[in-house]
Image (spheres, helix red, strand yellow):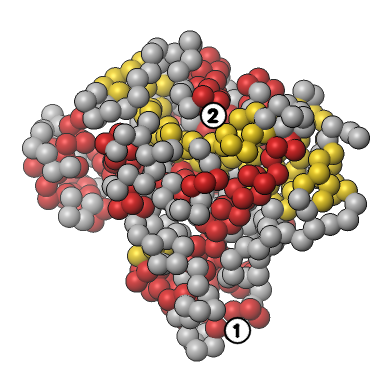
């Protein structure tokens, strides 16, 4: 039998050999009806040809995703999107570490088939099995119909999270046949993918499915309350002119009609919800109880995350001091009155907005998760990605998503528009190897990097990834203290 033919619990799958690596694409890991939890996939007779990526989740077109080289064509999407992809050195009995990637995209966009997520280098260079997955997005993955009919649509506001759990269950059950170790699984993700990881860390039915977690530019803060998610749901129903007593009509609509009706929803307002069914409490509340202290964690952010979004906002350069203050007051409700007095000697400009928003949206939640993990005796390592892209006259700096092709060693696979013509290969080699080491041993230390201590409250050791990598203790101490209501100036 060919080494690319593997027996799963649902039937045989045949992949293809790509150089030193075996690859299986588009394996079905679940099936689901609209707005319902995923179910086990149907078994099949014969051999399933796993040589083409499966359909991505239905999603809107996105200028940002296109810029990142991660755009998905409409014809490549479908509501039936429950597929995963595997890269392995060999389908043998070696039981290698497994890395399962959860893609980002604001819970609206993305797919496991994005070129930057090609697992070839991890498999060929570091003897790791890599899995990427699709999961339902937007209105299909996170419409909280349970706020209206909690019996028929229980959990509908978290279908995307349930899909992720279903994929992890499939991996746990089947990955050994692909040369992976079902008892050495690392989940990792970026942006909404990392926010998903932050949720999975706290769910009792998910935690037995992995041993380690990596969170890139996301943590455990981004969930909606049931009230807010219910309001979003009613707004979409109103757009469709469907009454709350006539939800059956939702099944008669095309995917395009549902997508169109949800286009008015602000960013991040169709996402995981504390529904009392799938997610019982805000993840940060659970983290504060030490529920994931038995999971080894690597977490970090990029130095200038928000620049990816601010670059599209030309109005920022037109704002005077009062306009900047109003923008920050609106963006940081409850925080800005405390923070503002400590910034009196700082110019009120675009750079200040970018720094404040980066810290509030990305850095502060990451620090909170790391500190709660450390406080409860869990192992956690912290990093910050500081390398700046030269494109757009350097205005993006170390923006959101910039670290992805470094982690995956895929700079030449669609990320050129973000990285420019000369990305730092040495830095990519170091990050790529550190991530693989973490997946193997639960420790990102490698000889090519300075000694990397675990993150603890007494040191807050953070690896800064740049041309020269170094450890800095508590690199944003002033802002950290401000966000925790300390009285330290950022001058």
Q: Nearer the viewer, residue 117 or 155?
A: 155
In the rendering, at what x and y percent does residue 164 appear? 57, 52
Q: Is residue 320 above or below residue 418?
A: below
x 13%, y 43%: residue? 485
* Residue 371 appears in the figure: no
In the rendered image, residue 43, in percent from the top left (x then y), is placed at 80, 58
Q: Residues within 10 Å of mark 1 (few under 14, many from 20)?
A: few
Residue at 73% over, 53% down: 28
Image-based side of 404 in relation to 362, left or right: right
Left/right of residue 140 with respect to residue 377 in the rendered view: right
| Distance in Å between CA atoms under marks 2 and 1 | 46 Å
Q: Pointer 2 and pointer 1: residues touching (CB < 8 Å)?
A: no
Name which of mark 2 and mark 1 comes first in the sequence. Answer: 1
Q: Quadrant of residue 296?
A: top left
Residue where numbered disc 2 is placed: 439
Q: Secondary structure at mark 1?
A: helix
Does 7 sit above or below residue 436?
below
In front of the other: 295 or 262: 295
Residue at point 67% right, 27% down?
Answer: 123
Q: Which mark is residue 344?
A: none
Q: Is residue 142 visible?
A: yes
- Please name which of the two marks, 2 or 1, marks the residue nearer to the observer: 2
Expressed as whole percent of the image width and height from the top left, the position of residue 337 reads: 12, 50
Q: Which residue is mark 1?
A: 249
Q: What residue is shown at x 47% (from left), y 85% (from top)?
A: 244
Q: Quadrant of the C terminus?
A: top left
Q: Residues within 10 Å of mark 2 (few under 14, many from 20)?
A: many
Give percent across and percent down for residue 131: 64, 39
Name the element at disc 2: helix
| Residue 44 vertical position relative to residue 129 in the rendered view, above or below | below
Question: Between residues 239 and 81, which one lies in front from this camera angle?
Answer: 81
């Amino acid at each position: 039998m060919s080494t690319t033919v593997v027996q799963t619990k649902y039937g045989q799958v045949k992949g293809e050999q790509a150089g030193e690596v075996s690859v299986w694409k588009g394996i079905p890991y679940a099936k689901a009806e609209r707005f319902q939890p995923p179910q086990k996939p149907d078994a099949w007779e014969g051999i399933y040809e796993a040589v083409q990526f499966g359909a991505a989740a239905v999603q809107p077109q996105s200028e940002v995703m296109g810029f990142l080289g991660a755009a998905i064509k409409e014809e490549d999407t479908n509501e039936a999107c429950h597929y995963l992809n595997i890269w392995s050195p060999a389908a043998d009995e070696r039981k290698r570490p497994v890395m399962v990637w959860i893609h980002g995209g604001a819970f609206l966009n993305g797919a496991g088939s994005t070129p930057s997520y090609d697992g070839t280098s991890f498999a060929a260079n570091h003897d790791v099995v890599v899995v990427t997955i699709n999961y339902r997005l937007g209105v299909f993955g996170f419409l909280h119909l349970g706020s209206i009919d909690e019996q028929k649509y229980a959990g509908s506001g978290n279908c995307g999270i349930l899909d992720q759990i279903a994929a992890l269950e499939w991996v746990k059950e089947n990955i050994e046949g692909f040369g992976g170790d079902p008892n050495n699984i690392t989940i990792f993700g970026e942006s909404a993918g990392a926010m998903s990881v932050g949720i999975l860390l706290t769910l009792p039915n998910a935690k037995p499915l992995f041993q380690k977690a990596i969170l890139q530019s996301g943590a455990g803060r981004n969930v909606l309350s049931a009230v807010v998610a219910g309001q979003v749901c009613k707004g979409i129903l109103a757009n469709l002119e469907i009454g709350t007593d006539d939800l059956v009509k939702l099944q008669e609509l095309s995917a395009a009609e549902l997508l169109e009706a949800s286009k008015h929803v602000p960013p991040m307002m169709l996402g995981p919800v504390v529904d009392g069914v799938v997610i019982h409490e805000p993840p940060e509340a659970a983290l504060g109880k030490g529920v994931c202290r038995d999971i080894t964690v690597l977490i970090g952010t990029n130095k200038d995350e928000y620049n990816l979004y601010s670059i599209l906002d030309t109005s920022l350069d037109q704002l005077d001091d009062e306009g900047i203050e109003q923008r920050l007051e609106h963006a940081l409700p409850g925080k800005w009155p405390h923070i503002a007095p400590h910034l009196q000697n700082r110019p009120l400009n675009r750079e200040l907005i970018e720094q404040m928003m980066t810290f509030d949206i990305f850095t502060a939640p990451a620090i909170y998760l790391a500190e709660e993990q450390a406080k409860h005796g869990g192992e956690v390592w912290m990093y910050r990605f500081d390398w700046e892209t030269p494109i757009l006259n350097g205005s993006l700096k170390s923006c959101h998503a910039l670290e992805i092709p470094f982690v995956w060693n895929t700079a030449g696979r669609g990320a050129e528009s973000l990285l420019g013509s000369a990305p730092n290969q040495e830095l990519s080699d170091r990050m790529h190897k550190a991530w693989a080491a973490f997946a193997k041993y639960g420790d990102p230390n490698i000889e090519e990097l300075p000694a990397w201590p675990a993150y603890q409250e007494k040191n807050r050791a953070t690896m800064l990834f740049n041309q020269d990598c170094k450890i800095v203790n508590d690199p944003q101490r002033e802002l950290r203290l401000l966000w925790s209501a300390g009285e330290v100036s950022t001058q």
